[in-house]
Amino acid sequence: MTGLAPITFVEPRSYPSYAADAPALDSYGRRIDYLRVSLTDRCNMRCVYCMPAVGMKFLPRPELLTNEELVTVLRAAAAAGFRKIRLTGGEPMLRYEIVELVRAIKSIPGIEHIAMTTNALRLGKLAGPLKEAGLDRVNISIDSLDPQKFRQITRGGSLDDVWAGVRAADEVGLRPIKLNAVVVRGMNDDEVIRLAALTTEHPWEFRFIEVMPLTGVAGLAEEGVISTAELVARISAHFGPLEPYGQDPSDPARRYRIPGAPGKLGFISAVTDPFCATCNRMRLTAEGRLHLCLLRDDELDLRAAVRSGAGQDEIEQLIRHAVYVKPWGHGLPEGVLPTLRGMSQLGG
Ligand code: SAM
Ligand code: SF4
């Protein structure tokens, strides 16, 4: 290794070399092959569970990895065994040249699947070009079916634009479509039955996400969290017992189906029922830091390496090291909260 100073929070500061041409395994034997890439910390909405109303500071553009730097990092990640990329943010569709960026990522040898998590405000226009550039799927956030309430929760978002995005995604074949709602008690939990009922009419997967106590929204999250167990009980009381549906061990969602429905339900319960044992993912922030566990602060600075001229092999070694030292899981049960970043900087 050169005299780079690439490691910021991750210890140890010196590390062995890792075998190339093998999947990246962490020290607990978990295979890590899924990278969630935040393309920007900016957003055209201000969801109450994600960002505080005031006081957000955004990264100046020179702090972000350029598209070229990002592709360099992702080539190294693919060489380290990452196979699936999810583009997120902030709002990923605010990223400049997003269509060309998707095309470049899709052409990286080893990358098998690119998905995007989006608020869909711009998806009506971009679904076709993104599909053509190689995007495989989208997850769309939709927390309410009431336009007024949607506007309140998102502090200004238009539900019509989101539905236009869902329609466009369906038309161009960005399928299967997954819709996400963060459920907060007293905010939108009265809509859980209506939201679940969408799966009785459409072949979509509707995912209910427990609100997590990230920086800036910890108070709301602590007071508003509703357990998956409670949601399943409420939905079952209305529709009848839910049928368990094809669990994928690396998917954090517990999946069910309303009997006879064409769509599915998913429940993601990081707080009340963590899925750390089957975790297969890491995150890359918009300024190029590998963030090792969503709910911990450990990071490794890849931008420093890229900007000091590190080659692909060297970046691959750094990524393999970050994978190796990935923490087992989060510390919420012991009251350890992440402090460095909010969800809009991490991408969910
Ligand atoms: N802007 C895009 C969107 O909203 O889909 C992508 C970024 S957003 C940060 C990614 C995911 O994180 C969304 O599904 C959002 O609902 C979820 N999210 C945001 N804040 C959260 C929180 N405090 N707890 C749980 N999920 C959260
Ligand atoms: Fe923006 Fe997504 Fe956060 Fe809402 S959840 S403020 S859409 S980044």
Image (cartoon, rainbow, N blue to C red):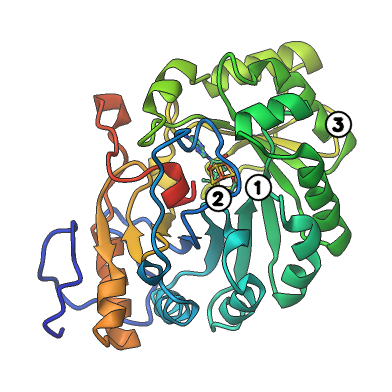
Q: Report the residue marked by disc 2.
A: 43
> Are dots 2 and 1 in contact, CB under 8 Å?
yes
Q: Report the residue marked by disc 3.
A: 200
Element type at mark 3: helix
> Are dots 2 and 3 in contact, CB under 8 Å?
no
Q: CA distance from mark 3 to mark 1?
A: 23 Å
Q: Mark 2: is the Cβ under 8 angstroms from ligand 2?
A: yes
Task: Tell me which numbered mark, 2 or 3, is placed earlier along the sequence.
Answer: 2
Badge number at residue 216: none
Q: Nearer the viewer, residue 229 or 125?
A: 125
Looking at the image, residue 107 sits to the left or right of residue 163; the answer is: left
Q: Crowding near pointer 2: few (<14 within 10 Å), some, many (20+)? A: some
Picture residue at 24% right of the left edge, 26% below the top: 334
Q: Mark 1: is the Cβ under 8 angstroms from ligand 2?
A: yes
Q: Report the residue marked by disc 1.
A: 119
Task: Tell me which numbered mark, 3 or 1, is placed earlier along the sequence.
Answer: 1
